[in-house]
Amino acid sequence: MLQQLFVETKARFFDTLNEEIRNEFRLISKAEALFNIHFPKNAELLAKAQFRLKFEELFYIQLQLLLKNQLRKQKIKGFVFGEIGEYFSGFYKNHLPFDLTGAQKRVIKEIRADLGTGAQMNRLLQGDVGSGKTIVALMSMLIAIDNNFQACLMAPTEILAIQHYQGLVELCEKMELSIYLLTGSSKKAHRRELHEKLENGEIDILIGTHALLEDKVKFHNLGLAIIDEQHRFGVAQRAKLWRKNKIPPHILVMTATPIPRTLAMSLYGDLDISVIDELPPGRKPIRTVHRFDSNRLKVFRFLKEEIDKGRQVYVVYPLIQESEKMDYKDLMDGYESIAREFPDFQISIVHGQMKPEDKDYEMQRFAEGKTEIMVATTVIEVGVNVPNASVMVIESAERFGLSQLHQLRGRVGRGAEQSYCILMTGHKLSNDSKTRLETMTATNDGFQIAEVDLKLRGPGDIMGTQQSGVLNLKIADIVKDNDLLKTARHIAQKVLKEDPKLALEKNKVLRFTYGQLAKHQNIWNYIS
Ligand SMILES: Nc1ncnc2c1ncn2[C@@H]1O[C@H](COP(=O)(O)OP(=O)(O)OP(=O)(O)O)[C@@H](O)[C@H]1O
C-alpha cells in the first residue's frame, strides 16, 4: 500500500535541489530517490538514491555553516585592535625566552590580522601537545592590552588555571602588568578585591576556571577571551563569555586535541582555524612501547634506572566515573605496590577526590622535584608541564581512548631528555584496543591519531554530546563519505559566491529548503 501511495504522490514531490546541481552530478530526482531508497528497483538505483540523499544532506549542512559564518562576519562587529604597542613589541624584543617557531609566528600573524579587521574574531587554535600555544595566547593578550582592553584566559581545571597563571606571571615578570587568578577556591576577600579591580580596569589579565563565568565577574572592557581546551566547555558557557561585553570580545579557543580535518570542516564550516604544526626545536620524539602486566618487574627496573639518572616518572591509572570506587581501589593498590617497590623514592599522589589545595600541593612538590614519582588519575591529563618528568607509565591502557592516551603521553617529552611512554595492559585485548595501542606505538603525530580515533569512535563521541547535533546525520557518514562532503562543501561555496543571499530565481528552491531546515536546528555553531 505504501508503495502504491509513493507511486501516486511521486509527481507531487517538488525537488529540493535545483536543476543546475542535479545536472552537474547527474543526481536522480528527490521523488525517485525516496522511492528507491524504500523500494529499490535494482542495486544501481539503490546506489543512486543513496548518493542523491547523502549529497543533499551534506550540501545543506555546508550551506548552513557557510551562511551562518557569513552572517556572523557581517553582523557581529568586533573591536578593532589597530595598535601594536609597547607591551607586544617590548615583550617580543626583550622578554621572549626563546625564538618562536615558524608555526608560532604564522599563527600570531593570523591572529593579529583578525584583530585588526573590525569583525569579531572567532578562531580555533589547534596545536599538538607541547607545541607552544601558551606563548601565542600571551602575545595575543598583549595586543588587547596595547589597545587598552582587558583579556582573560579560561582553563578547564584548577590545576591548569594555576599553572597558566604562574607561567604567565613568570613570563611577564619584567613588565608592568596586573595579572589575577580566579578559581572556585579563591577566598572571599580576594574575590572582593578582584571584582572591584576588574570593574575599574585595574586588572589587565584575568586567568581562571569557569568561575570567570559567574555573573559577579564584570570586566571594565574585555577585549579578548581565550578558552583553553574547548572540548570541556559547552556552547552555553562560551556564549556567556560573549555576553561579558556589549560588543562581544574576540574569542580564541585553544585545543591540544587535534580535530581531524573532515570533522573540523563539517562542524565549523568556515570558522577560522590556525594550526601550530611544528614542535619547538630540540625535542626528541617520545618512545612508546606496549608491555603486558606480566612484565611489570622489568618495567619497574627501568623506572629505577631512569630515576637514578635524575628523571621523574608518572604512573597513571584510569578513573572512569561509573566505577569510581573500583578505580579508586586500583589507584590505591597501585600506590601501595609502588611504595613497596620504591622505598627510597618520594611519591606524590593526585586524584579527583582530593581537595583542590591538596592536589595543588602534591603537584607542586612534584613540579619542584621534591618527589620522584607521581601516581595519578587522569586529572593530570591536560596541560601539566614538568619538563624533568620523562617517563609515563599508563596502567590499564586499554581502557583509555586514543586521544586521551595521546594527551597523557604529552605530559612527557617536554624537556631535552629522551622520554618514554609505557602502555601496560593484560593479555586479553579487544580489536579496538589493539588498534589503539598499535597506533600509539607507531606515531607521535596528534593529527594522525585523531584520524584513527575518528574512525574508531565516530564523530559524536569525539566532540561530546552537546556538539554532536549537527552530526546526527540521517544517511551520510562523515568518515566514509569524506569525499562527498568535500564536494558538497565546494558546491555550497560556489552557490553562495554567485548568490550570497540565495536570491536568484534558480536558487529559490535552495532558499526555501534551507529555510525549512533552519527552523528545526539550533544555532550552536554560531558561537563556536
Ligand atoms: N619556540 C619555542 N622554543 C622553545 N621552547 C618553547 C617554544 N615554544 C614553547 N616552548 C616551551 O615548550 C613547552 C610547551 O609549551 P606550552 O606549554 O605552551 O605547550 P602547549 O601547546 O600549551 O601544550 P599542552 O597543550 O600540552 O599544554 C613549554 O615549556 C614552553 O616554554
Image: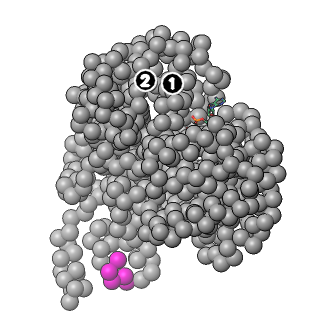
Q: Is 267 or 201 nearer to us in this picture?
A: 201
C-alpha distance separating marks 1 and 2? 7 Å
User: The magenta stretch spans which residues?
Assistant: 37-41
As helix, strand or loop, the secondary structure at mark 2 comes to: strand
Q: Nearer the viewer, residue 466 or 30?
A: 466
* Residue picked out by circle 1: 169
Specify the quadrant that holds the C terminus: top left
**Apparent side of residue 322 relative to residue 69 in the rendered image (left or right):** right
Q: Secondary structure at mark 1?
A: helix
Task: Please say if the residues under marks 1 and 2 sit with CB atoms less than 8 Å apart.
Answer: yes
- The percent coordinates of residue 77 (x first, y second) are 27, 27
- Is residue 259 in view from this perspective? yes
Amino acid type, mark 2: Ile
Q: Which of the two discs, 1 and 2, labels the residue nearer the N terminus?
A: 1
Can see residue 256? no
Question: In the current view of this chain or complex, which residue is farthest to the bottom?
Answer: 1
In the rendered image, the vertical position of residue 489 relative to residue 250, given as above or below: below
Q: Mark 2 = which residue?
A: 179
Label 2 neighbour load within 10 Å: few <14, some 14-19, many 20+? some
Q: Which image quadrant shows ligand 1? A: top right
Q: Which mark is residue 114?
A: none
Query: Residue 143: x percent and y percent?
Result: 44, 19
Q: Is residue 191 magenta?
A: no
